[in-house]
Image (cartoon, rainbow, N blue to C red):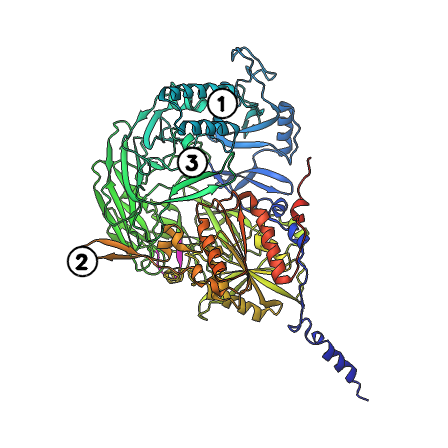
Amino acid sequence: MNTRQPFLFLLLAFPSLIFAGSGGERTPIEKANYRQAARFSRAKIKKLVGSTAVDPHWLKHSDRFWYTYEGVEGKIYYLVDPDKKTKTVLFDNAHMAALITEITKDPYDARHLPIKKIMFIKDDRVIEFDVKSSQDEEKKKEGEDEGDKKDEDGDGGDKKDEDGDGGDKKENVDKKDEDGDNKKENVDKKDEDGDEKDGDKQDGDKKDDEVDKKDKKKKKKKKDKPKKKNFHFEYEITTGKLTLIKDYKVPEDKPKWASISPDEERVVFGRNFNLYWMDKANYEKCLKDEDDESVVEHQLTTDGEEFYSYAMRDRNEDNVKKEENKDKRKRVFLAWSRDSKKVALTREDSRKVKDLWVINSLSNPRPTLESYKYAMPGEEGFPQRELHVIDIESKEQVVVKTEMFKDQYIDIYRAPRLKKNRDDKNKPALWLSQTSDKLYFGRRSRDMHRAEICVADTGTGEVKVLVKEELNTYVETQTPYLINNGEMFIHWSERTGWAHYYLYDADGNLINPITEGPYHPSSIEGVDEKKQLIYFTANAREKNEDPYYDHLYRVKFDGSGMTLLNRGNYSHDANMNDSARFFVNTYSRVNTAPVSDLRDNTGVKILDLETADLSLLMDTGYKFPEPFKVKADDGVTDIYGVMFKPIDFDANKLYPVIEFVYPGPFWEAVSQTFRAGDEGYQLAQMGFIVVQIGNRGGHPGRSKWYHNYGYGNLRDYGLADKKAGLEQLADRHPYIDIEKVGIYGHSGGGFMSTAAMLVYPDFFKVAVSSAGNHDNSVYNAWWSEKHHGIKEVVDKEGKITFEYNIKKNVEIAGNLKGRLLLATGDIDNNVHPAGTLRVAEALIKANKRFDFMVLPGQRHGFGKMGEYFFWIRADYFAKHLIGDYRDSVDISVINRDKAKTR
């Protein structure tokens, strides 16, 4: 008898026994794990993970800094002295809680301190901060003098109303309501405005109505929402003394329209398309009552008009709000001279740019129309930009002579913000030059093949070109770094195919390259002019590392002495102080806990600061994502990625694979550092392998060749690499089911995920594509013309025109074989819903079944509907990749966490 026959029979009957656990037959996932996915939502993970980086607040009068760090013991406040090599707590939390409790009568403990708005004052010897009480502010009785009332703290009475200005609370509340969204006062105003537009009233009646409206506003007082009492404290660091500051008036929030000068004596703003300014005293009146009729304003310009304005256009403003706000103060995007005497701004003429619209169907009491100027690729009507310099005192205006390229772009170069000013209430944008006689700016041709670094004489408007750059794709530029106010300057350029720094003299003559080689410097972190040293962040220089890992380097102006300052096979984030003596270094990978330390400018470690506490997260069974490297479709180029697995991953099972995509070209959707809560990780818990894979043409942090790989083929350029990368992963890992491939993305990723389904319809089986720019001919001109390309054509007479042509998802909609869900917000004014609707129409014409979702009242990011859409996406993949069809109307994983208060 052959004793092997029964065993052979079992192998033939159950072939999975042959290869179980070794890459053969595997059990496919048949049920989605909703409960496990819900456990790893971004919100829940953030509750388990405190701080993951030291974020230093550098002080004004020394090289010290303070920071907060939160762990399982709560939030701790630290003060670090690099020179003394010390890290101490700012205060003992338990003692501080006791002091605050005794004064406010609200109970607090060491783990739950209510401290807000920390500022260092009095030469950094004292900190001030606010504490919000559980008790409401006391209302001032009518007719009561401010000095008559004493509160129980003996501070002369609670003189602040809801706005902290001692005025009529209800009137101020109503004024705020006029600016709010969908509020009752707005509804009333809409009705009144509608009556006037009907033309039923005479001019005199209209004037009477305006008076009536003002009276109505005063009478239509909304019920005040009580405001909580604010306590303001000062704490002496050396003595530990805590003092309640009595009679403290809470500073008013800076209104969006106010551009405050560096000396804080003037405020510039827009009104009725023109520029105005007011002095400090009148601005303080506005803070108390923005409609104070005694406020004195000084008009700077008179020729502004709609769509040729000095002020900024208010985005997200529908026709009703536009009418309500037409005479109100507006923001101005400008830069100040450091002496506070002049401002510079770009004025855009959009009168010939065509309109675009979205309709907000959720507006009350009826839908509203939002109309805005929107230049699309290749269109003749294009914004025309001018550069203006205005002397505030004399009102003298100089229009800089910027004309060079047809339909050019203009950028005012602004000075980097000082780290020590981080916590200042006023942080004005300053132009680059330290003097008011020079203005540095950049200009680029419409096709972005040419760019120039320029300096203008602010008295005459004459322009001097300092540097010219030219490429056959697009030229990237950065703000130059001035040395000794322009005696020399550092310029960033990709002219050799790699980004590098170059040193120039004041006249634009090249002195020498500072960096060179096959790596990518990205940003200047500090400069020591006396020692002629530059500190900069770069990537792709260190061997045997992910090329996207950032490091800090220093080098001399002449290019010598290149030194790596933060070694280690991690991505590093360096925060250097203004003196360029010290930096805080935080580093991690996707599969390590973030660590922060303090180093000097030679790279020597001074102090270990923090290591992120991931213990609570690990207690859940969390497992780090796995980084990997594959080859691009060319078989040569290295592509990097990250894989997310379920925490109950079983190598003997067979998992559908889902790819999260964003094509670039200014960012690849691949994480390099640890993140507390990644949507891909959560989706993987459903029972998927989720991957992020880069692609040629995606990331700007490699060679110019890599970055511009998709130039001229913006639809298809990344898809072959995405496919090739997945195939290599499936060859390595037999638990990946390469016959069940899903793909999803948002915005550019929405466009790319649908393109993948149409270009490779037999490979990609399911896609969820949200807010995609599927038809780039109806997306904004800047992005599409830059990254895809537009051709400038000059005829025999010298007339310049532009030719534009691009591949669209609409053109190959008939290729669809798999399951596709398209989604868009109905008031997306970035990637207009038209792009998604055009794909839908093409699919209908091709007689294809697909799914379509409109998220009402949502713009590009889907806002508060983001969690809802996550589960809709998860449902879609569960149905079509796993075969798990849930038929419940309720999304129970959301409802389970919702508190029922009614």
Residue 290 in view in this figure: yes
Q: Indicate which label's residue lies in the foreground, 1 or 2.
A: 2
**Is the stretch drawn in magenta largely helix, strand or loop?**
loop
Q: CA distance from mark 1 to mark 3?
A: 25 Å
Q: Could you say which is closer to the camera, residue 308 or residue 736?
A: 308
**Front: mark 2 or 3:** 3
Task: Using the rendered image of the protein, determine whether residue 165 is visible from the camera's viewpoint.
Answer: no
State which quadrant residue 299 falls in.
top left
The amino acid pointed to by label 1 is: Asn
Kindly identify which residue carries mark 1.
172
- Looking at the rendered structure, the kind of residue marked 3 is Asn
Q: Quadrant of residue 788?
A: bottom left
Q: Label 1 neighbourhood size at 10 Å, few (<14), some (14-19), many (20+)?
A: many
Relative to 542, is 889 above or below?
above
- Work out which quarter of the rendered image holds the N terminus and state it: bottom right
The part of the chain drawn in magenta is 515-521
**First in sequence: mark 1 vs mark 3:** 1
Mark nearer the N terminus (1 vs 2): 1
List the single residue furthest toward the right.
Answer: 1
**Number of marks present in the image shown:** 3
Q: Which residue is mark 3?
A: 319
Q: Residue at x 39, y 20 (%)?
A: 205
| Residue 516 counted in the magenta span | yes
Say which element carries label 2. Answer: loop
